Image (cartoon, grey):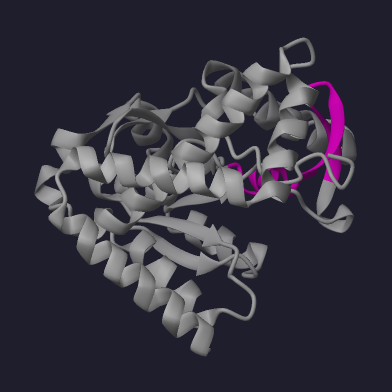
Amino acid sequence: MNADFFIILTIKIFQCCLRLLPERFRVFSGISLGRLAYHLLKKRRLIAISNLKRVFKYSDEHELKEIAKRCFERFGINFVELLLIPYLDKSKYNEHFFIENRDYIESALEMEKGVLAIVFHYSNWEIMGIASTLLNRDIIALARPLKRHKKLNDFLNSLRSSTGLKVIPNEWTGKAIMRFLKENKIVALLADQRVKRSKGILVDFFGEKVFTNKGPALLAMKTGAPVIPVYLSRRGFLRYNVVCGRPIEIERKGDIENLIEVNTRKLNAFLETIIMEAPEEWFWVHRRWGRNS
């Protein structure tokens, strides 16, 4: 508890300093934080480079290290943006953010089955709640709580919620999510986390079988809720396009296990596409391929 107090105090002091700085120094602060993390967090740096080698098998190692470094720099900028987003006037959101293909969401909501918004650790996923304000719709997001750090977890969730997002612990059951969908809410689910074998299914991801969360596919099959992949496209500091992908067609006829695999693979395929567009924007530092990465 004491550790959380000092961490939060340090973050708040840094937050106050950021508010006094012009934008170019805010960007510099974020990049500097990312570069510092790149050099200090050796284990995470090596995981990122190892993961990149799995995907870009024929690329030069120096090039992959540069992608990893830019990835860390993006994390630093993301953190700075997350600290500043509560102080961005919501009346100015339209000057900073834009929703691409919002008609996909609006058409899906007309079905009155809710929407499963599939999101990823891509670009600045931490501020994706801006979509709630832009759409003027409730968006419920499941967040994995920080174990043994309740105060810090609450502080981070308060930052996320400042955009209009409603954050709930991801321990909540599928029944709760189905209730939100019946109320025609938008439920955001992270689809690229490494999961336990009991909660996942082996599905291709960049040519290798990895355990992938089968929850989104199961929920879509059970509820009939439209599935729309959503991600942020970075345009500048605290300037993004919220990109709504074309609704993913969910197959529902056939063997249940095969259907789960087929539908989950569609989510992985979409993620592969946006990663290849901007590799530095994805969360390479976690063991997506397991302990061998």
Asked whether, in this view, residue 99 is left or right of residue 256, the answer is: left
Is residue 211 visible in this depiction of the protein? yes
Figure quadrant of the C terminus:
top right
Outermost bottom residue: 2
Q: Residue 288, percent across and down?
A: 75, 42
- Is residue 218 covered in magenta? yes
Q: Residue furthest left?
A: 91
- The spot of residue 33 in percent (x, y) is 43, 49
Residue at 60% of width from left, 64% of height from top? 144
Q: Examine the image and state in which quarter residue 269 appears.
A: top right
Q: Residue furthest top?
A: 58
Q: Nearer the viewer, residue 135 or 183?
A: 135
> On the rendered structure, is 94 left or right of 266?
left
How many marks on residues?
0
Magenta highlight range? 201-224
In front of the other: 80 or 273? 80
Identity of the residue drawn at 63% across and 17% down: 63
User: Residue at the spot x=35%, y=54% of the render?
Assistant: 82
Q: Is residue 274 magenta?
A: no
Q: Is residue 248 visible?
A: no
Q: Could you say where residue 285 lies in the image, as x and y percent from the top left? A: 66, 43
**Lateral position of residue 166 relative to residue 148, left or right:** left
Residue located 60% across and 40% down the image = 283
Residue 205 is situated, as x and y percent measured from the top left of the image, at 77, 28
